[in-house]
Image (cartoon, helix red, strand yellow):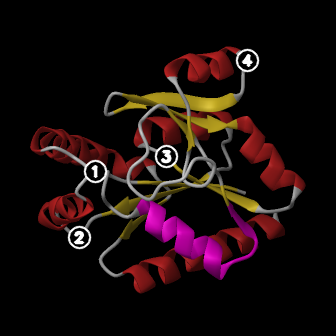
């Protein structure tokens, strides 16, 4: 199963996805490509594949991506290789991608499971962005504006989960995944 977790910048996609993989050995977190610079503590090949725009477009022209998009001025892409590796290992592959990417994945893989991660409210989201400390005031303003646009797209998703408590959020998403696995085995 391909699982997409989307949500606004700062909603906790990375933290939630990491916790999901820790709790279920059948889940594989896909490592996507980006042209943005690594944040403090991020590692190439672990958090993302950090590449130059030249390398990104070279991979794009080779057909290496299932989807790609521009988010906050940087390029991001879902590698086909991650989908294929997950399937060959008989694992469900989780992608943390934006709304544009989720739509493209749904168009290519109509059985993909799409989960939208919501902040409890915009102030909480802004506090998380402040805590992260990686954006300028202008960047934060743009991210909050984009967050409001992304939240409007939430009805496109199969499930919406509010991330107000990490443990509860992870538990709820695991329940969704187990439910979907059961449904798909019956078919």
Name the residue nearer the viewer: 113 or 29.
29
Asked if residue 131 is among those painted magenta in the image, a careful observer would answer no
Q: What residue appears at the point 41 percent right and 38 percent down from the top-left corner?
A: 37
Residue named by callout 2? 120
Mark 4 or mark 2: name the one nearer the start of the chain.
Answer: 4
- Magenta segment, prevailing SS (helix, strand or loop): helix
Mark 2 or mark 1: name the one nearer the start of the chain.
Answer: 2
Q: Label 1: how many residues lie within 10 Å, few (<14), some (14-19) or many (20+)?
A: some
The residue mark sitting in front, 3 or 1, is: 3
Residue named by callout 3? 97
SS at mark 3? loop
Q: Is residue 51 above or below residue 133?
A: above
Residue found at the very far right of the displayed protein: 88
Region rendered in magenta: 13-28
How far apart in space, not on screen, are marks 4 and 3 (Cα)? 21 Å
Residue named by callout 1? 151
Mark 2 or mark 3: name the one nearer the start of the chain.
Answer: 3
Q: Position of residue 93 (x, y in %)?
A: 69, 56
The image quadrant where one finds the C terminus is bottom right
SS at mark 1? helix
Mark 1 or mark 4: name the one nearer the start of the chain.
Answer: 4
Q: What residue appears at the point 26 percent right and 51 percent down from the top-left corner?
A: 134
Name the residue nearer the viewer: 43 or 158.
43
The image quadrant where one finds the N terminus is bottom right
Residue named by callout 4? 62
SS at mark 4? loop
Mark 4 or mark 3: name the one nearer the start of the chain.
Answer: 4
Q: Label 2: how many residues lie within 10 Å, few (<14), some (14-19) or many (20+)?
A: some
């Amino acid at each position: 199963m391909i699982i997409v977790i989307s949500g606004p910048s700062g909603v906790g996609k990375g933290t939630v996805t990491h916790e999901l993989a820790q709790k279920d050995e059948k889940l594989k977190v896909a490592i996507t490509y980006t042209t943005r610079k690594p944040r403090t503590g991020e590692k190439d090949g672990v958090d993302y594949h950090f590449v130059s725009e030249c390398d990104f477009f070279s991979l794009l022209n080779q057909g290496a991506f299932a989807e790609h998009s521009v988010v906050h001025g940087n390029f991001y892409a879902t590698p086909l290789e991650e989908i294929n590796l997950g399937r060959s290992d008989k694992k469900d592959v989780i992608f943390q991608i934006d709304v544009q990417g989720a739509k493209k994945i749904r168009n290519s893989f109509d059985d993909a499971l799409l989960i939208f991660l919501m902040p409890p409210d915009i102030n909480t989201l802004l506090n998380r962005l402040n805590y992260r400390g990686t954006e300028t005031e202008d960047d934060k303003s743009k991210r909050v504006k984009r967050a409001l646009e992304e939240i409007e797209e939430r009805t496109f998703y199969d499930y919406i989960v509010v991330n107000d408590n990490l443990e509860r959020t992870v538990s709820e998403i695991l329940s969704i995944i187990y439910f979907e696995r059961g449904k798909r085995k019956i078919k």
